[in-house]
Image (tube, rainbow, N blue to C red):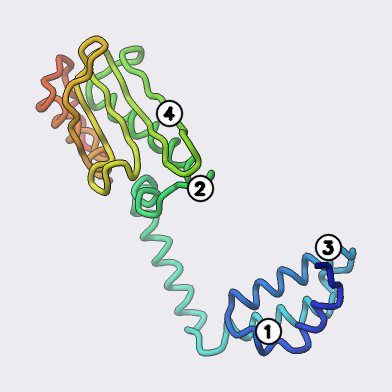
């Protein structure tokens, strides 16, 4: 229901807005009402009062500014140290188009690095991406004449995000499982794949990429 006076009423008595989410929601509604009525958001008294109330909630009984900045710096550094694929696997990508797009982009990069570690040359392998439905991650795959590798989240649970098997014509061999962390160390994973599947290609010998 459209009520252009509601933002003023709430701004005059904001005591019920006791949390940052509730105060932010009220502020966003007030801004939206300004947009609908073409009011000046920067000068609207309800918007300004609600913004100040939100600011007070962010200050009362909260850590000091310096502590918050230090915590943000530490959190950002921790994220930078963690490969994006691992972060996406932990949080999931279902019903999140941006996260899912990142998963497929990073998955293709990881598969391409693995192809190099397996000693495969351009034209000897294909990296493909299947988006599937919005509720699931879909999968990223690497296939050759004798090998099929698939990355998918959630299918077999944590620690089994990667499936690999031999391919013999139209038939596939027994499924083998590996963790996403193994995929992120392509040289070591390539050695395992060669050992267990007895591939004819020669694995690369460069230094492993750190996860």
Q: Which residue is mark 4?
A: 129
Local crowd at mark 1 within 10 Å, few (<14), some, or many (≥20)? many
Q: Earlier in the sequence, mark 3 or mark 4?
A: 3
Q: Secondary structure at mark 1?
A: helix
Q: Earlier in the sequence, mark 4 or mark 2?
A: 2
Q: CA distance from mark 1 to mark 4?
A: 47 Å
Image check: 165 left or right of 89?
Answer: left
Residue at 50 percent across and 85 percent down: it is 62
Q: Secondary structure at mark 3?
A: helix
Image check: 19 left or right of 29?
Answer: left
Residue at 20 percent across and 33 percent down: it is 187
Q: CA distance from mark 1 to mark 2?
A: 33 Å
Q: Earlier in the sequence, mark 3 or mark 1?
A: 3
Residue at 57 percent across and 85 percent down: it is 59
Residue located farthest toward the top when viewing the structure as drawn: 169
Coordinates of residue 48 in the picture (x, y in percent): 77, 79
Q: Secondary structure at mark 4?
A: strand
As drawn, the label of residue 53 is 1
Residue 144 occupies quadrant: top left
Residue 177 occupies quadrant: top left
Q: Which residue is mark 3?
A: 35
Q: Earlier in the sequence, mark 1 or mark 4?
A: 1
Q: Secondary structure at mark 2?
A: loop
Q: CA distance from mark 3 to mark 2?
A: 29 Å
Q: Nearer the viewer, mark 1 or mark 2?
A: 2
Q: CA distance from mark 3 to mark 1?
A: 21 Å
Q: Earlier in the sequence, mark 3 or mark 2?
A: 3
Residue at 71 percent across and 78 percent down: it is 51
Q: Which residue is mark 2?
A: 95
Coordinates of residue 167 in the picture (x, y in percent): 22, 17
């Amino acid at each position: 229901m459209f009520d252009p006076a509601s933002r003023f009423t709430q701004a005059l008595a904001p005591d019920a807005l006791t949390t940052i989410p509730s105060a932010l929601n009220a502020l966003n509604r007030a801004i939206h009402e300004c947009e609908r009525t073409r009011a000046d958001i920067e000068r609207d008294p309800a918007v300004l009062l609600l913004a100040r109330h939100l600011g007070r909630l962010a200050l009362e009984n909260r850590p000091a500014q310096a502590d918050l900045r230090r915590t943000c710096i530490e959190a950002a550094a921790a994220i930078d140290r963690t490969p994006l694929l691992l972060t996406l696997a932990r949080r999931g990508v279902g019903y999140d188009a941006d996260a899912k797009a990142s998963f497929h982009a990073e998955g293709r990069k990881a598969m391409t690095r693995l192809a190099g570690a397996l000693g495969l040359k351009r034209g000897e392998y294909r990296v493909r991406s299947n988006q599937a439905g919005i509720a699931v991650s879909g999968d990223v795959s690497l296939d050759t004449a004798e090998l099929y590798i698939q990355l998918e989240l959630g299918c077999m649970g944590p620690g089994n995000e990667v499936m690999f098997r031999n391919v013999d014509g139209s038939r596939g061999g027994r499924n083998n499982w590996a963790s996403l962390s193994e995929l992120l160390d392509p040289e070591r994973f390539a050695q395992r794949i060669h050992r267990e599947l007895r591939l004819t290609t020669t694995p690369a010998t460069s230094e492993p990429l750190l996860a």
